[in-house]
Amino acid sequence: MTPHMNTRRAAALAAVAAMVVVGTQTGAANAHPNTPGDTSSASPVSTPAFSTASARTAAIKSAQTDASSTASTLKLGAKEKLIARDVIKDANGTVHTRYERAYDGLPVLGGDLVTHTAADGTLKSVTKATTARISVPSTTAKIKTAASARKVIWAGDGTPVLALESVKTGVQKDGTPSRKRVITDATTGKVLQSYEEIETAGIGNSQYSGKVDVSTTASGSGFDLTDGDRGGHKTYDLNQGSSGTGALVTDDDDTWGDGTGDDRQTAAVDAHYGAAKTWDFYKSAFGRDGIAGDGKAAYSRVHYGDAYVNAFWDDSCFCMTYGDGADNKSALTALDVAGHEMSHGLTSSTANLNYSGESGGLNEATSDIFGTSVEFFADNTTDAGDYLIGEKIDINGDGSPLRYMDEPSKDGGSADYWDSGVGGLDVHYSSGVANHFFYLLAEGSGAKTINGVDYDSPTADGSTVTGIGRDKAVQIWYKALSEYMTSTTDYADARTATEKAATDLYGADSAELKAVDAAWSGVNVK
């Protein structure tokens, strides 16, 4: 779909997560319309048991207060500290607390971990990005670097080392902002990791949501695009600029746009609508208040650059940004684009999957999975839900979609199945494995028609997979992402994480867990 810029702490790419067996949990039941293949009337949901965003904030603060004792329980070194990032409480009282680590005051990149604690306070298990002992001989750098570089501990390649992290900014060839993060060994000067933080997801030129309701706020003698119902989300017009916030979009009579790219408000309407539907989906499906779960809204910027054929999410501003397409009249503000971009922010707020290698493919697939789910959730008759990514933006000029979840290779580059070379692909192509897994888990293999679209999903071994329905599948993926995946999760780890999530939600002998295993085997992740 569209690009996504994610300013995040760099994290390890190669370490294998330590996945410890967790006991069975049962989430709260939450009825949703069933999708094809779903034979039940309701789906258990891993809904956080915090009634308000402030309760969640208090839980994080409490976890930080107890961080020293937690570090002691985990037998971390004397120089290690834990920094609480997120807390999720299941309906049965199980608490999942996500931490970053510091060593001697320095951030540990790839040191993130999640503790899983029973309702009675008993530590059940720990999920770690790396099992390596965090320790370095010295925290004094031996090489010179830019004053803006910060010292860190790099735990991504086995033995932790002292490193220097720097960021180089600029502009890519297509006008997308560039922010390249480089991790350098502070002793030898060797580059340990380098990656572009702008996470591209696709491009297009369609405006297609039709007549929709948008939440606005009266201001003076008119109205502005401020959504008071969803954390105060605002939509701004950059007026072809490429920096700053731009001007808040306003109107005299609360009737916005005319449905064409000739009217500047139209792009703002689509962006505002997409943000609202994504917020509502997170709330309805996961009990989550906004991208970070703290009740605070992101904001949207439209009309970025001149003939900019892209869109992106940026953690540094906590905002979505949309270009106007090659003709400056075809804004990239489609519904699944908005859901995709905002979901990059959700990933950053939870597992923080590195945007490189297999973890990068999982990151990109997560945005496709949730963007698709937003599209189904919106139930917009002009843009019915489907498993085609970017089908409305006509990126290829022939009406074909950007990506296909049922058979990813139909786009000419994405991987249908896992093999040892998948991690070397562009993340938009390696994402095919997880997209295919999700489709198989939700809908199953073989030929079928959903909302007027024909699908015929194959499997690597010719096996038949029976789907459990999209509602259950998305619950499993969200729980795995928010509670069991870490920055370094690869496809093998993702299988383990989703197995744990399915066990928590549906039981160790459930049909849902068996379907998870069958779907992963169907994409050759064994």
Image: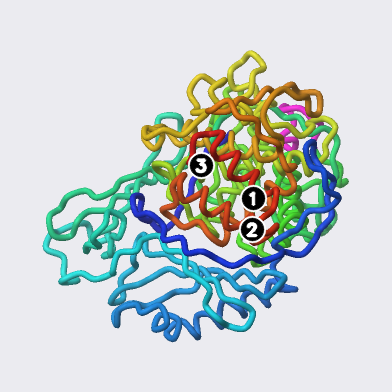
The residue that label 1 is drawn on is: 513
Marks counted in the figure total 3
The label nearer to you, 3 versus 2, is 2
User: What residue span does the magenta drawing correspond to?
Assistant: 257-268
Q: Nearer the viewer, residue 334 or 354?
A: 354
| Residue 513 percent coordinates (x, y) | 64, 50
In the image, taking residue 481 as reference, residue 224 lies left or right, namely right
Label 1 Cα crowd, 10 Å radius (few <14 / some 14-19 / many 20+): many
Q: Nearer the viewer, residue 188 or 117?
A: 117
What is the spatial separation of the Cα atoms under label 1 and label 3, in whole angstroms? 47 Å
The residue that label 3 is drawn on is: 242
What is the spatial separation of the Cα atoms under label 2 and label 1, in whole angstroms? 7 Å
The label nearer to you, 1 versus 3, is 1
Q: Confirm whether the magenta stretch covers residue 266.
A: yes
| Residue 334 percent coordinates (x, y) | 69, 34
In the image, taking residue 74 as reference, residue 466 lies left or right, namely right
Could you tell me which quadrant the N terminus lies in? top right
Q: Amino acid at mark 2?
A: Ala
The residue that label 2 is drawn on is: 508
What's the residue at 29%, 57% (across, down)? 165
Q: Nearer the viewer, residue 390 or 217?
A: 390
Q: Amino acid at mark 3?
A: Ser
| Residue 453 percent coordinates (x, y) | 76, 23
